[in-house]
Amino acid sequence: MSGIVTRRNVLIGGGGLLLAGCDRIAASPTVRQTLTLGETVSRSAQRLLIGDRQSLAPEFTRAEMSPIFRVNGSSRPASTDYAGHVASGFADWSLVVDGLVATPLALSLAALRSAPSRTQITRHDCVEGWSAIAQWTGVPLGLLLRRAGLSSRAKYIVFHCADDYAGKPYYESIDLVDAFHPQTILAHTMNGAPLSVGHGAPLRLRVERQLGYKQAKYVMQITAVDSLAGIYAGKGGYWEDNHDYQWYAGI
Amino acid sequence: MMTEPAPAPSPDPAVIYRTRLPVRLWHWTNAVTVFVMLMSGMMIFNAHPHLYWGAYGANFDHAWFEIGNHGTSGYVKTAGIEIPTTGVLGYAQGTDEAFPPLVTIPSHYDLSAARRWHFFFAWLLVGAWFAFLVYGLISRHLWNDLALTREEARPSSLWRDIKAHARLHLPRGEEARHYNPLQKLAYIGVLGVLLPLMVLTGLAMSPAMDAAWPWLLTVFDGRQSARSVHFLCAAAVALFIVGHLAMVVLAGPINELRSMITGWYRLPRDVP
């Protein structure tokens, strides 16, 4: 049979050529740069629409919550340090707030739990397309940044996490518009119970107008910076650096 | 009609200028844009090939539609029925993606790249659509060529057109100077209903847009419902393209293609 050109083979071969062509176009840096323009336009348009920048993500009632909120991404950081914290119930753990701040902070979990908090029932939207609704309680990020005396030079807030993917540490970043948004909190409580290890114990970020990969789990250190360059690959997050995801995840 | 006097002197009275330049440019922009949107959209769908109704929906929730596989046999599941689709959906071309490499952009699993394509071309689609509407209003193209006349909108004449299409009797001679009623309805349906629905359901999936325009969620009854409607509209657009191409082939592909490239169209000869 070999050597016979069947219609099927021609179709598959033609399709293959077309695919190879498309993928070559897609891989070209110029094309990628052009396509990224769309991201810039989307971010600018959305920021324009958000207007006073304080418009809230929709909140839900208890009856509207997901029966099961799936654990996604890392489910347990592999480091021995983290295992020690889990064993001791995070008694010796502390959140570091540093970088472009007047007074760096180190806050225990007990201190964070007794700090003023906000409780919100919000929808978590994964970049893959699924959504889950849960109740989150935590300290408004803006409160911590003000207490630390955020410098006027700061442009981004970077979240360093305890988990990693194949040795590459998870981290994320947001700008100050989102950092000072009233719904942006560091959640220590989920659905009324202390945050479980699967969902990011002891502390995870909630930045409700963006997608799931921005909701960093296992937050250990918060650093205020004026540029994302120089932090790992410089694109502002693990998924941005390693898998080319968009830094702005509002869409 | 055969007895009508010949129109103004012209080398060939059967050749008419049917499609003006802005409409032709818009058509070809759309042709590219819609394919990129559908193909990158299918890659994005591959990231989570389940659809839900309501505000939330994830792996443990009930999906009304899903594409999946058991090992190397693909299936589509809806309303409790599992339809085997190996070789087409769920498992095809040696990969276990919902939509196979042949129809996705990029051809391999790459969610961030597919999103980049989708959101760039979404701006083109909306921009071109808006420009077309403005042009259509100013040039009266929308009223003169797309709107159904009172006569055409009568159920009896629509029914006549449906029967004519079913018998593959396409308009000839003078009748072919204008779009026929079903053709007008198809264009109005895509431009006036499907496209706006696609854009609004697309926006409803954006968490930032939900904060800016919370009414989106009220209108579509939640983000996951909006995602389902987005997918259904995409399927309807794909069906339109199949129908559209079929009509081009039936009506004479060379003549139709030429008219959409140069604007000049040869009226098919009346069958006596």
Image (cartoon, coloured by chain):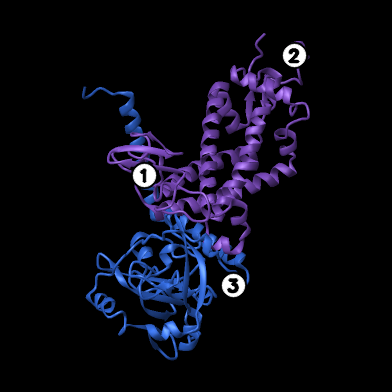
Residue A180 lies, with reference to residue B76, above or below; the image says below
Name the disc covering residue B1, or none.
Answer: 2
Name the disc covering residue B107, or none.
Answer: 1
| Chain blue in the figure, letter | A
In the image: residue A164, left or right of residue A245:
left
Same-chain status of marks 2 and 1: yes
Query: Pointer 1: residues within 10 angstroms few (<14), some, or many (20+)?
Result: many
**Furthest-top residue in this view:** B272
Whether residues under marks 2 and 3 lie with C-beta atoms below 8 angstroms apart, the answer is no
Indicate which label's residue lies in the foreground, 1 or 3: 3
> Residue at the location (59% across, 71% down)?
A53
- Give x and y (percent) for residue B114: 42, 51
- The front one of B63 and B31 is B63
Q: How far apart are marks 1 and 3 (CA)?
A: 40 Å
User: Color of chain B here?
Assistant: purple
Amino acid, disc 2? Met
Q: Quadrant of residue A101?
A: bottom left
Q: Mark 3 lies on which chain?
A: A
- Give x and y (percent) for residue A222: 40, 79
Give the residue at mark 3: A54
Q: Which chain carries label 1?
A: B
- Give x and y (percent) for residue B174: 71, 20
Q: Which chain carries label 2?
A: B
- The front one of A244 and A122 is A122
